[in-house]
Amino acid sequence: MNRPAYHHGDLRAVILDEAARLVAQRGADRVSMRELARDAGVSHAAPAHHFTDRRGLFTALATQGFQLLAAALVAARGHFADAALAYVRFAIEHPGHYQVMFNRSLHDADDADLAAAQAAAAAELAAGVATLRDPGARSDPEGAQLAAWSLVHGFSTLWLNDALDAQVRALDPMDTVLRIAMMLFKS
């Protein structure tokens, strides 16, 4: 899909937005820097000024994704259920970011900005888990954090990959994740 030619503004943001859209639409393996440049209306070399290469692009996209996830979790502070809902909502609303964020073969896991963004998102999810009054969660906070992340990440991945049966897909994903979160933990 060709967009209007890019003339001014933040090319980096334009490329990241288009990359997220294309990854969500057809997968990261089918996104090229040349195509992103063409869609933005710039020379094929222009994106390299911001990202160097495809790995740099996906590192920036993953970093942005973790920053957005952390912000969503901050906005949902209050109770674990709110954090669980925010996580799944983020995944559903940002599938392109989500796909790249957790695929280490696509990005530079040693990038300092990416590591900081990952840590911020993890800390916010941990803050949500810390609100649980469940005795098991209180006695093993690290285990509770892993269980909570596994739940929201696993559900999000299953939902995005259309791996749930039609009966589950017919339900509201927010209601479903809330129901299973409350099964796992006593709030």
Image (cartoon, helix red, strand yellow):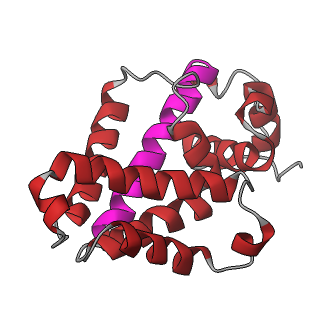
Task: Identify whether 6 is placed above or below 176.
Answer: above
**65 part of magenta stretch:** yes
**Could you say which is closer to the camera, residue 68 or residue 47?**
68
Magenta region's main secondary structure?
helix
Q: Give the residue at x 73% y 71%.
A: 169
The C terminus - image quarter: bottom left
Task: Identify whether 2 is placed above or below 111.
Answer: below
Number of disc labels: 0
Q: Give the range drawn in magenta.
A: 52-74
Q: Give the residue at x 37% y 75%.
A: 182
- Please identify the quarter of the rendering in which residue 51 is found: top right
**Could you say which is closer to the camera, residue 147 or residue 3?**
147
- Asked whether, in this view, residue 61 is left or right of residue 147, the answer is right
Residue 88 appears anywhere in the view:
yes
Q: Where is residue 132 in the image (x, y as percent from the top left)?
A: 20, 70
- Asked whether, in this view, residue 54 is left or right of residue 37, the answer is left
